[in-house]
Image (cartoon, helix red, strand yellow):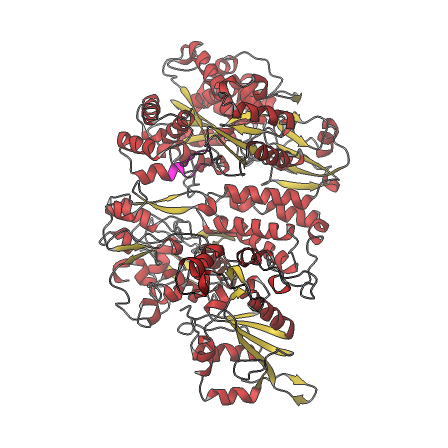
């Protein structure tokens, strides 16, 4: 007998120690998220996965599921706020999809589509963020960074390298690499690193192999991000 | 003089030795290296990294988080003007501009001769004797034009800070009203002796009986916290005193530590007895650097008096000692889980909670985090009993509260009152006239209008961490709110999206209104941001960042309406100014090279 | 395509103006890709100022559709004129919505760009920055439309597909907030 809770009226089973988002995705219920990844310690920073429980808004990636819990997620009010968060991410960085090789495979873009974001709404910050093209195999384009820290966690917990970290504070928070020169070429990062592969947006791109999958046939071209709920719970299929 | 490569190596080695190469003390090491070297150079990080075997990203990530740590040269003299609204009201920005002109340096930049940098910083806790500034993190109060002139002369002549006139650095206590806590004249050790007589269990019961609640603002019951920590499983327990008094307008902890340090340390020692802790840490905000030597001396004296160390007051097994950790300019570290992260030598990012510190705090072990004033009050309870203490104040709020009064009043300073005192009584006592508003508990607290001055300082009415900023009728409450919004944007840790981006968007909107570009559209936007900050943010900083705006909109709406003159949406930036670079490059100044206000395009 | 604007008893066509500011006309080309549905559309709308009509000044309109962002002073003047004359303003395409390709200059300072183009590089304007009063001056930064005037609706894409434009126009003409859904909502 497994325990269960309800999310948007649907009953979802969970195992002891599972978070709300883990159980929901595994049960086929999509909850928008960006910094959550099933293989890494939850971060709880993007706040996209915020759900309503007992009249309180909480991040579903850092909250354990409880028997009989009543969770609201796919509501107009929550989706409005989530869309606002996405808009914030779009104006904070420089997200120019037409020139991005990640377009169609990008989780930020796909989530924005899912939430029906027609414009970024706010005034753009247009920050100055130089690109790091020093590495022979990996291009680092900080303009697209959403500070989800997935690369930080993957490099630390999976690759064992600590190649990436967040530096600065507040709106000046930014990604740094593990080199005195500040250049990716001077780190031990390789194309095979989990940290490089896990980036949900187009910060880390493989060089010399652009557009292997044509636009229109990419992951989120085929199906909306919400159709990948189970895949997002079990990443190897994604 | 900024040292050369050998000096840097020596400074790093000294910091490493002082902290026995323990990477948990990385923030302390970085701070000490900067004190010796004026900044933290890549070479200093090299040496630190090799010795600690830490990834460079970890050290740079920590150094980059704290406002007082510099990984680029910032000059031998690093001047930071306190920029709380109370400093503004005393003309801090005029003095800053004046100093910049005298020293030929642009605000926020380092002078070309690498001698000096001048900028602002969040409230330095000297609101009752402002305008204040920090020079190399040492506080200078009551800054005047004359004092700026003198400082400039000292800087130009490269006089070492240690040789500057001592009176510059004098910080007054300004205790205006004492009650049971500030008036306590017991000797060090009295409370401990009373507690030992009762035993650890009895002490916790007394604290519970006293109804003492946390003085940092949240008001959690101290006895329950101690009991929960004592009962939580763990290999070790820790006592942490939160002296990261960062809430603008609050300065009571500064005085408690300056004049009643024994009481604070004794309160921590009581807690150690209650929960079975062997180690305590006092997290002192970087702005109070000048208190460090004094506090270390008090600790040393208490060790000699057997009030700290092994076998306290002869009780076998009662082993406890306290270390001071200095912060480095990060308001968010006042949030208890961020404070613990910072104590562990990390970026001061609030943790996901639960688990709470009482079960998993410092190094994952059960930890009590209490405010300075709370620990001091514990001494009263230990000595005079919980029942006595519960009888002071109101039914729901036991004891007294120390208020830090500043702003438009004749007698700023500390006022200790039993809970239940009305705002009006405090205003009368401090000599405030024509009062328009009082900001209680700082920017994250509540802004009261005149009709509410009958309300009481108490957990059941207006809870407070202690700030009490007075604004008379001459003040523009929009400017007050705008100053606070800038504060939150500057202090957001950047961890979660809504606060990181939202506080900056809110700041930009308040500036837009201030710059005369506001319309009803922007007002709606402000309300929308307020809502999302409250509902989506990770910690209290984001949740409360909108409070000053919400309160002033509700209570001082005309201050906003004056700024919403435009019927239609206007750009946030000045369109004509957006053509200025092109005008300069082309030398044009014809009609087509301008957008003119009042050309029928401005409504 | 169910409602045209009714005035009294006479059904009059919805008056629409379009223009391209700092854009490439790609959005206009994509609009033309709705092909034979243009005939249906023209039953309901009439065009005012537009590259398709060659009318130079925008008159009173129900809907103004603008492609391209704001790169220079003239772009701003045209945009403001559209805002004054049109009941609803629709930003179409990446450039109008986020500055698009022209905004990729925003990480450089304008003086640096002008120097590079006219002073450093060979072959242009004999080393002088053009200063003819006939030429609109460039703005220090390229801006999306909504940062300068209130914009009512947005149709994203670079360009939006003909299907997306058709769907969004239908929604707007029917008085609905445009909604595109998977496959039609694209930022590239």
Asked if the stretch drawn in magenta spans residue C81, the answer is no
Q: State whether the magenta stretch is mostly helix, strand or loop.
A: loop
Asked if residue A159 is positioned above or below residue C101 in the image, the reply reads above
In depth, the one of B480 and A77 nearer the eye is: B480
Residue in the picture at 45% in, 53% down? A127
Asked if residue B542 is positioned above or below residue B178 in the image, the reply reads below
**Looking at the rendering, which quadrant does residue A107 occupy?**
bottom left
Q: Position of residue B190 (x, y in %)?
A: 52, 13
In the current view of this chain or complex, which residue is farthest to the right? B434
In the current view of this chain or complex, which residue is farthest to the front? C126
Asked if residue B8 is positioned above or below residue B566 in the image, the reply reads above
In depth, the one of B568 and B2 nearer the eye is: B2
In depth, the one of A32 and B475 nearer the eye is: B475
Asked if residue B157 is positioned above or below residue C47 in the image, the reply reads above
Q: Is residue B65 left or right of residue C3?
A: left
Q: Is residue B342 visible?
A: yes
Q: Position of residue A149 (x, y in %)?
A: 36, 49
What span is in magenta?
Answer: B61-75
Residue in the picture at 56% in, 45% down? B545
Q: Position of residue B503 (x, y in %)?
A: 53, 48
Q: Is residue B223 visible?
A: no
Q: How many marks?
A: 0
Which image quarter holds the C terminus of chain B?
A: bottom right
Asked if the stretch drawn in magenta spans residue B64, the answer is yes
Q: Position of residue B126 (x, y in %)?
A: 59, 28
Which image quarter holds the N terminus of chain B?
A: top left
């Amino acid at each position: 007998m497994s325990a269960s809770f309800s999310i948007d009226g649907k009953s979802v089973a969970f195992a002891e120690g599972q978070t709300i988002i883990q159980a929901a995705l595994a049960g086929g219920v999509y909850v928008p998220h960006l910094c959550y990844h099933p293989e890494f310690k939850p971060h709880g920073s993007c706040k996209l996965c915020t759900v309503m429980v007992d009249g309180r808004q909480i991040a579903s990636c850092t909250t354990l599921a409880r028997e009989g819990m009543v969770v609201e997620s796919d509501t107009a009010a929550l989706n409005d706020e989530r869309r606002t968060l996405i808009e914030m991410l779009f104006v904070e960085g420089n997200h120019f999809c037409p020139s991005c090789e990640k377009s169609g495979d990008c989780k930020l873009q796909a989530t924005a589509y899912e939430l029906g974001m027609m414009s970024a709404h706010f005034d753009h910050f247009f920050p100055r963020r130089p690109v790091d093209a020093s590495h022979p195999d990996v291009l680092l384009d900080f303009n697209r960074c959403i500070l989800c820290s997935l690369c930080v966690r993957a490099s630390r917990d999976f690759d064992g390298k600590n190649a990436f970290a967040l530096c600065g504070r507040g709106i000046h928070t930014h990604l740094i690499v593990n080199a005195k020169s500040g250049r990716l070429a001077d780190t031990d990062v390789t194309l095979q690193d989990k940290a490089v592969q896990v980036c949900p947006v187009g910060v880390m791109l493989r060089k010399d192999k652009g557009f292997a999958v044509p636009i229109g046939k990419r992951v989120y071209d085929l199906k909306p991000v919400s159709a990948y709920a189970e895949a997002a719970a079990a990443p190897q299929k994604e | 003089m900024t040292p050369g490569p050998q000096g840097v190596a020596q400074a790093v080695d000294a910091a490493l030795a002082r902290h026995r190469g323990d990477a948990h003390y990385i923030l302390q090491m970085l701070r000490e290296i900067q004190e010796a070297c004026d900044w933290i150079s890549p070479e200093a990080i090299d040496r630190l990294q090799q010795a600690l075997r830490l990834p460079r990203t970890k050290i740079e990530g920590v150094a980059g988080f704290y406002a007082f740590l510099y990984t680029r040269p910032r000059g031998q003299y690093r001047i930071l003007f306190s920029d709380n609204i109370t400093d503004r009201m005393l003309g801090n920005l005029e003095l800053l501009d004046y100093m910049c002109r005298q020293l030929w340096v642009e605000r926020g930049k380092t002078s070309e001769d690498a001698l000096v940098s001048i900028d602002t910083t969040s409230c330095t806790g000297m609101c009752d004797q402002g305008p204040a500034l920090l020079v190399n993190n040492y506080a200078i109060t009551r800054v005047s034009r004359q004092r700026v002139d003198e400082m400039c002369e000292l800087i130009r002549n490269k006089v070492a800070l240690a040789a500057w006139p001592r009176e510059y650095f004098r910080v007054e206590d300004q205790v205006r009203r004492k009650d049971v806590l500030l008036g306590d004249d017991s000797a060090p050790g009295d409370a401990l002796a009373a507690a030992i007589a009762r035993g650890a269990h009895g002490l916790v019961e007394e604290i519970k009986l006293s109804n003492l609640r946390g003085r940092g603002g949240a008001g959690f019951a101290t006895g329950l916290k101690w009991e929960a920590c004592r009962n939580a499983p763990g290999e070790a327990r820790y006592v942490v005193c939160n002296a990261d008094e960062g809430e603008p307008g609050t300065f009571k902890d500064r005085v408690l530590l300056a004049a009643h340090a024994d009481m604070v340390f004794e309160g921590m020692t009581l807690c150690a007895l209650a929960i079975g802790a062997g180690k305590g840490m006092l997290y002192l905000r970087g702005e109070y650097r000048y208190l460090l030597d004094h506090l270390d001396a008090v600790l040393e004296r208490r060790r000699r008096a057997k009030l700290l160390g092994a076998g306290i007051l002869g009780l076998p097994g009662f082993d406890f000692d306290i270390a001071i950790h200095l912060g480095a300019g990060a308001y968010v570290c006042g949030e208890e889980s961020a404070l613990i992260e910072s104590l562990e030598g990390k970026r001061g990012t609030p943790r996901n909670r639960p688990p709470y510190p009482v079960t998993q705090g410092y190094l994952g072990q059960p930890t009590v985090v209490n405010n300075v004033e709370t620990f001091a009050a514990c001494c009263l309870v230990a000595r005079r009993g919980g029942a006595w203490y519960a009888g002071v104040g109101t039914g729901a709020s036991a004891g007294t509260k120390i208020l830090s009064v500043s702003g438009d009043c004749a007698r700023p300073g500390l006022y200790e009152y039993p809970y239940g005192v009305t705002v009006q009584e405090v205003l009368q006592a401090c000599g405030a006239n024509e009062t328009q508003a009082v900001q209680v508990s700082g920017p994250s607290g509540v802004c009261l209008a005149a009709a509410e001055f009958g309300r009481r300082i108490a957990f059941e009415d207006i809870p407070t961490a202690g700030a009490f900023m007075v604004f008379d009728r001459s003040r523009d409450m929009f400017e007050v709110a705008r100053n606070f919004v800038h504060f939150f944007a500057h202090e957001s840790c950047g961890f979660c999206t809504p606060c990181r981006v939202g506080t900056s968007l809110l700041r930009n909107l308040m500036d837009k209104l201030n710059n005369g570009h506001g319309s009803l559209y922007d007002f709606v936007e402000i309300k929308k941001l307020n809502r999302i900050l409250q509902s989506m943010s990770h910690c209290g900083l984001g949740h409360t960042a909108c409070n000053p705006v919400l309160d002033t909109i509700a209570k001082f709406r005309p201050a906003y309406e004056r700024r919403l003159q435009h019927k239609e949406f206007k750009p946030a930036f000045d369109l004509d100014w957006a053509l200025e670079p092109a005008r300069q490059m082309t030398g044009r100044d014809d009609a087509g090279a301008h957008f003119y206000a009042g050309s029928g395009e401005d409504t | 395509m169910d409602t045209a604007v009714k005035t009294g008893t006479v059904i009059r066509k919805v008056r629409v103006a379009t223009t391209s500011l700092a854009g490439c006309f790609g959005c206009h080309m994509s609009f033309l890709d709705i092909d034979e549905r243009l005939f249906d559309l023209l039953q309901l709308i009439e065009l005012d100022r537009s590259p398709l009509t060659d009318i130079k000044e925008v008159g009173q309109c129900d809907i103004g559709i603008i492609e391209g962002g704001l790169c220079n002073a003239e772009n701003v003047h045209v945009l403001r004129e559209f805002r004054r004359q049109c009941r609803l303003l629709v930003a179409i395409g990446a450039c109008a919505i986020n500055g698009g390709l022209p905004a990729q200059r925003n990480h450089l300072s304008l003086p640096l760009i002008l120097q590079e183009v006219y002073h450093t590089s060979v072959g242009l304007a004999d080393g002088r920055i053009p200063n003819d009063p006939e030429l609109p001056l460039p703005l220090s930064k390229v801006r999306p439309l909504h940062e300068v005037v209130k914009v009512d609706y947005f149709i994203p894409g670079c360009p939006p597909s003909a299907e997306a434009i058709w769907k969004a126009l239908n929604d707007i003409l029917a008085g609905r907030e445009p909604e595109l859904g998977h496959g039609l909502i694209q930022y590239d």
